[in-house]
Image (cartoon, rainbow, N blue to C red):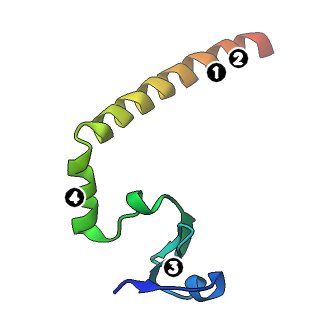
Amino acid sequence: MLSRSITLKQLRYTPRGVMKDGKAAGSRTLFTGDVDTLVFGKEAQRQAATKCPGGARKAEQELQALKAENLQLNGLLSLFRD
């Protein structure tokens, strides 16, 4: 059940809640975000994923490219440290 909290203190002890300014709690974790992008539950996550097809795939590809670049940069850095 989603509850609307008035104060941050109330939100801190609410399993799921959203404040008007975008602060939210889910699974007793506090976070901030745009109200349009907040998703709770598996069905909401599935619906959010279908709204941006390929977004997760593109993000995964970018992450892999960054990891490869990080590996190369660490290799270069080790040459200068020796």
Amino acid, disc 4: Gln
Q: Residue at x 28, y 61 (%)?
A: 45
Residue 8: image location, x then y, percent? 64, 81
Q: Earlier in the sequence, mark 3 or mark 1?
A: 3
Tag 4 near tag 1, CB within 8 Å: no
Amino acid, disc 2: Ser
Along the line of sight, the residue nearer the viewer: 71 or 61: 61
Q: Label 3 belongs to which residue?
A: 28
Along the line of sight, the residue nearer the viewer: 79 or 69: 69
> With respect to residue 47, does 82 lie above or below?
above
Q: Residue at x 57, y 68 (%)?
A: 21
Q: Earlier in the sequence, mark 4 or mark 3?
A: 3
- The numbered mark at residue 78 is 2
Residue 9 appears left or right of 49: right
Residue 9: image location, x then y, percent? 65, 86
Q: Label 4 belongs to which residue?
A: 47
Tag 4 near tag 3, CB within 8 Å: no
Tag 2 near tag 1, CB within 8 Å: yes
Whole-angstrom CA distance, mark 2 to mark 1, is 6 Å
Whole-angstrom CA distance, mark 4 to mark 1, is 39 Å
Q: Quadrant of residue 81?
A: top right
Residue 32: image location, x then y, percent? 56, 63
Tag 3 near tag 1, CB within 8 Å: no
Q: Which of marks 4 and 1 is nearer the N terminus?
A: 4
Residue 37: image location, x then y, percent? 40, 57
> Disc 4 or disc 3, which is closer to the eye?
4
Q: Label 1 belongs to which residue?
A: 74
> With respect to residue 71, does 33 lie above or below?
below
SS category of the residue bearing label 4: helix
Whole-angstrom CA distance, mark 4 to mark 2, is 45 Å
